[in-house]
Image (spheres, grey):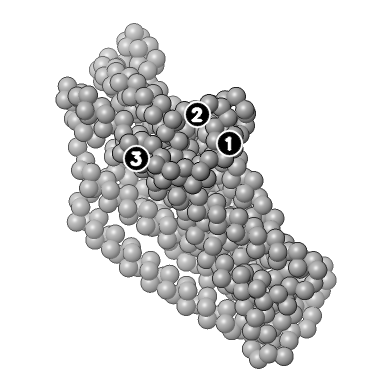
């Protein structure tokens, strides 16, 4: 058996690299369309200031893009180095979207980002705008294919287990692509990226206005960011509701943990606004409930129930016992692969195969299984509730905070007096970290909430890891943390340096850092 310590270290290493990588991804996704908007206005109006805006914000985008690529490559290699059995078991399905992402999206994005920076004096206005649009399309296509792969991990449709190859094999490519979880996750995630890009531009523009420098440049950037950010955060909230619905359909355990819902409530279920989960006694010591809300979000109905954790555990206990039979039937079928009775017996219960494999964490043979071990496996099927509950609520709280800031920014942009609202400018500046915190929390809820599975209901995490030594994991983990921290420091230094320099860093002679020397269209 693989040691639990090895599994935990492998999970920690992937989590650290993923969370570091996701510091760069949202800004890359979000900045692309802001650059498209700015350059479109330049092409339509011919005003040089919009070209300067595209070039300046594009410079900050380029710094971030380079760091995102560097950290992202490591993640893909880890599937082979740290999660070898996972790659073997589901590689036929999971590998296809990642391969398409590399061929279709990453090469497109990388090619046109070069043309974006070096094509200003070689392409016409319209040609360069087309380059910027294709760069944005490539970035979003990259996110699409990666999230299709991740969505399949959450809801493994369009594939079946083969007792001949002992792997999951794709049976319907289009079902994998149009997986409801993947589609909801994609639109929700890219909207969060758009929000991040908008807040980045809004915050830095607000800082320029507070300092009284490059005012016209900052005003125009602020207006674009306010409008784009308000639309984006509204999309995040609306599509977050859709994500909640898809989770309720495919991952009831995750939904129950997010809501600290221990009992199956009469429909429609209430929403726990605030609660103090008591995991030992499987209850909430304190809760403030909003009637009906959870039932409507989770089921889109007033009559359909959402199962609580206690009911889910009882169902999982039955599936674990059935899964023991599936593992036993599989062993018999592999010895006599042409026996139709054995094949029929396995097909009837193969959906529970993954649940039977949960016991392999504790025993090498089912002869060793006891009621206590089954109970351990049952408890493993539900992630810890408190981290899920509070991470989700903090994420939602940050979302509504940003909705308020973008709402006021747009309102006063329309009125034309936002530059005099110092409370608004300071709020926008101080809110700069908010979208990153929200994105990291959202990723945590999605991935931690899937445990104990790498492929939900199919492949347990403890069976997915490579047979590495603990010392090698400690060494590589320390190396990743050290290297990524250096990269993060470099990014922060460059971002702060060029943000402080402002559009004057373009060397056009039209901007300066002193108050009163303003840019003119």
Measured from the top left, where is residue 232 in percent x and y? 66, 55
> Outermost residue toward the left?
368
Measured from the top left, where is residue 17 in percent x and y? 38, 57
Q: Quadrant of residue 114?
A: bottom right
Q: Residues within 10 Å of mark 1 (few under 14, many from 20)?
A: some
The residue that mark 1 highlights is 291
The residue that mark 2 highlights is 265
- Residue at 28% of width from left, 31% of height from top? 377
Measured from the top left, where is residue 297 in percent x and y? 59, 37
- Residue at 61% of width from left, 60% of height from top? 402
Relative side of 343 to 493, left or right: left
Q: CA distance from mark 2 to mark 1?
A: 11 Å
Depth check, mark 1 against mark 3: the one in front is: 1
> Outermost residue toward the right?
45
The residue that mark 3 highlights is 279
Q: CA distance from mark 2 to mark 3?
A: 18 Å
Q: Residues within 10 Å of mark 3 (few under 14, many from 20)?
A: some
Relative side of 30 to 441, left or right: right
- Residue at 55% of width from left, 57% of height from top? 398
Q: CA distance from mark 1 to mark 3?
A: 23 Å
Q: Is residue 100 visible?
A: no
Which numbered disc, 2 or 1, marks the residue that appears first in the sequence? 2
Image vertical order of residue 121 relative to residue 228, above or below:
below
Answer whether labels 1 and 3 touch (C-beta < 8 Å): no
Image vertical order of residue 16 relative to residue 42, above or below:
above
């Amino acid at each position: 058996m693989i040691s639990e310590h090895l599994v935990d270290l492998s999970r920690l290493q992937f989590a650290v690299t993923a969370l570091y990588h996701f510091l760069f991804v949202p800004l890359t996704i979000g900045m692309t369309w802001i650059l498209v908007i700015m350059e479109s206005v330049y092409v339509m109006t011919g005003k040089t200031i919009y070209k300067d805006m595209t070039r300046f914000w594009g410079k900050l985008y380029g710094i971030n893009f380079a760091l995102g690529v560097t950290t992202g490559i490591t993640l893909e290699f880890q599937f082979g180095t740290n999660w070898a059995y996972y790659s073997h078991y589901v590689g036929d399905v999971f590998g296809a979207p990642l391969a398409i992402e590399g061929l279709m999206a990453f090469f497109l994005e990388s090619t046109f980002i070069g043309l974006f920076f070096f094509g200003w004096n070689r392409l016409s206005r319209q040609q360069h705008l087309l380059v910027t649009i294709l760069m944005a399309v490539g970035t979003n296509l990259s996110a699409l294919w990666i999230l299709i792969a991740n969505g399949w991990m959450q809801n493994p449709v369009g594939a079946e287990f083969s007792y001949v190859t002992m792997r999951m094999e794709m049976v319907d490519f289009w079902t994998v692509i149009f997986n409801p979880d993947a589609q909801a996750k994609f639109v929700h995630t890219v909207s969060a990226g758009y929000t991040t890009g908008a807040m980045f531009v809004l915050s830095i523009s607000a800082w320029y206005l507070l300092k009284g420098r490059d005012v016209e440049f900052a005003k125009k950037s602020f207006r674009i960011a306010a409008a784009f950010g308000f639309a984006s955060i509204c999309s995040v909230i609306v599509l977050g509701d859709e994500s909640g619905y898809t989770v309720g359909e495919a991952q009831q355990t995750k939904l129950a943990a997010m809501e600290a819902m221990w009992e199956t409530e009469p429909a429609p279920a209430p929403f726990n606004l605030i609660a103090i989960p008591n995991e030992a006694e499987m209850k909430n010591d304190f809760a403030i409930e909003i009637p009906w809300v959870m039932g409507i979000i989770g089921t889109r109905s007033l009559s359909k129930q959402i199962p609580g954790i206690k009911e889910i555990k009882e169902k999982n206990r039955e599936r674990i016992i059935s899964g023991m039979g599936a593992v036993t039937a599989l062993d018999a079928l592999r010895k006599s692969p042409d026996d139709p009775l054995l094949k029929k017996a396995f097909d009837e219960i193969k959906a529970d195969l993954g649940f039977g494999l949960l016991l392999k964490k504790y025993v090498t043979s089912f002869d060793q299984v006891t009621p206590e071990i089954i109970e351990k496996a049952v408890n493993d099927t539900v992630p810890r509730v408190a981290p899920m509950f509070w991470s989700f609520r903090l994420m939602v709280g940050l979302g509504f905070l940003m909705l308020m800031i973008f709402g006021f920014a747009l309102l006063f942009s329309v009125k034309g007096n936002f530059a005099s609202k110092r409370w608004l400018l300071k709020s926008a500046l101080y809110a700069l970290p908010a979208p990153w915190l929200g994105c990291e929390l959202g990723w945590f809820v999605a991935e931690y909430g899937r445990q104990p599975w790498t492929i939900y209901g199919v492949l347990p995490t403890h069976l997915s890891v490579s047979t590495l030594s603990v010392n090698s994991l400690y060494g590589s983990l320390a190396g990743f943390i050290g290297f990524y921290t250096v990269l993060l420091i470099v990014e922060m230094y460059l971002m702060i340096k060029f943000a402080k320099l402002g559009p004057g860093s373009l060397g056009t002679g039209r901007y300066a850092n002193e108050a009163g020397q303003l840019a003119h269209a």
